Amino acid sequence: MRVAVIGGGIIGCLTACHLKQLGVDVTVIERGETGKEASWAGAGILCPIHPWLYPDAFTHLMNESLAMYPDFQIEIEAKTGISIEWKKSGLLIPFFDDDKVDHWQSAMDWSERFDWDVQQLNAIQTLKHEPTIAEGVRKSLLWPEVCQLRNPRLLKAVNVWMKQLGVSMLEHAEVSALLTDQGRVSGLCCIDGRKVVADQVLLAGGSWSGELAQQMGFALPVAPVKGQIVLLKGKPGLMRSIIKHDDAYFVPRADGRVLVGASMEFVGFERGNTDNVIENLMASMVRIAPGLKNCEIEKQWMGFRPGSPDGMPYLGSVASIPGLWVASGHYRNGVALAPITAKIMSQWMTGEKPSIDLSTFAVDRPLLNSPKVGFPEKVV
Ligand SMILES: Cc1cc2nc3c(=O)[nH]c(=O)nc-3n(C[C@H](O)[C@H](O)[C@H](O)COP(=O)(O)OP(=O)(O)OC[C@H]3O[C@@H](n4cnc5c(N)ncnc54)[C@H](O)[C@@H]3O)c2cc1C
């Protein structure tokens, strides 16, 4: 069987590796270079931002994916010799008197229901664990098992792994049309006229999947949600855990760098960093974690999250076009969900029924706008 994968992000690349391991002849077609869009830009937090805001089916999918990470990181590092800097740093949510939303009870209920280890810290314990936090902190919740990784390293490793497995890669090739024969998928056509023959096609085009779907003749409400990030040059040990607050998150890397993220902007495909957004992120840092304020800004960047109206990915086949599949719209959680996405999509495309009920993620599910986890307001 021949499969063509549109998009060389983490979703397309990792699914291609799994397909290849199942004996499929697979080609990844990437408009630019593999792994240079959202999958490169993300913060690498392996936990949803506020998981209690999602339906239970999402948590089940997430838990399955996160459970795969320990073995996955050992395997990929052993095969490629590249460390993805997967580490258990924990995630801490501090609570202040002027918080707009109080997540405490929902967070506690969710953690208990899904058996996520959570610790309740008072102000003194919070400041002892994380001295960078503002002294006005009232209390905090700490999930010690939450992990993180470094996206560029993950993408580099997956790229090497694809080559080792013999996945065909067509870079600088922009897919312009789906080819069909009597209504069934027969391949793809690129803007420069190149054609790829395939029995099945997987649409994993990240934020561009919505537009591509429209060209192919079906509706997929995936659209870009821009996120800007600032990288601070800190000293190792300055921060222990990921700190998450409604206004911003802070992710400490092993080498002392701290990532400050991320804006949520519904501004289409507008590239580049903007002063007002970076200033807002820095203001949040001074308010929530002033212990970071003397760190020099090393770099800024941005990426387009493949957003969806209900915050959840689209996984499955397109009923109206036999042979066409979708794995897209992973929004804020694509790195965390990549292992399970790759596993189930590859099994499903090769004829094995997924072991998890995926109806919540169906491509033709009813359009449900969720203001809490869906698209943000037009501006930041
Ligand atoms: C600032 C930011 C922070 C984030 N933080 C986290 C986090 O902490 N944890 C987490 O799990 N997730 C996070 N995410 C989300 C995560 O990065 C994404 O959900 C994930 O990377 C999506 O992967 P993808 O492969 O679907 O998309 P992408 O990585 O965008 O890949 C899609 C690819 O398709 C290609 N493509 C598009 N159109 C075509 C075409 N016509 N022909 C050929 N190729 C095409 C693109 O060039 C691109 O390379 C974050 C994202 C951002 C931007």
Image (cartoon, rainbow, N blue to C red):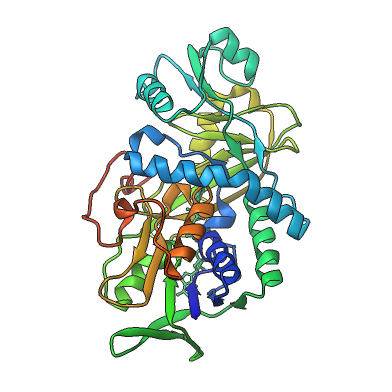
Whether 49 is drawn above or below 331: the answer is: above
Q: Does residue 374 appear to the left or right of 11 in the view shown?
A: left
Q: Residue at x 45, y 66 (%)?
A: 204
Q: Closer to the camera, 244 or 270?
A: 244
Q: Position of residue 269 (x, y in %)?
A: 42, 62
Q: Does residue 46 appear to the left or right of 188 in the view shown?
A: right
The picture quadrant where one finds residue 220 is bottom left
Q: Closer to the camera, 98 or 32?
A: 32
Q: Residue at x 58, y 78 (%)?
A: 172
Whether 212 is drawn above or below 330: the answer is: below
Q: How many marks?
A: 0
Whether 159 is drawn above or below 93: the answer is: below
- Find the residue positioned furthest to the left: 366
Whether 101 is drawn above or below 266: the answer is: above
Q: Position of residue 75 (x, y in %)?
A: 69, 53
Q: Is residue 174 visible?
A: yes
Q: Is residue 276 visible?
A: no
Q: Closer to the camera, 290 or 366?
A: 366
Q: Closer to the camera, 240 or 197?
A: 197
Q: Position of residue 224 (x, y in %)?
A: 40, 57
Q: Residue at x 40, y 48 (%)?
A: 265
Quadrant where the C terminus is found in the figure: top left
Q: Position of residue 165 (x, y in %)?
A: 67, 71
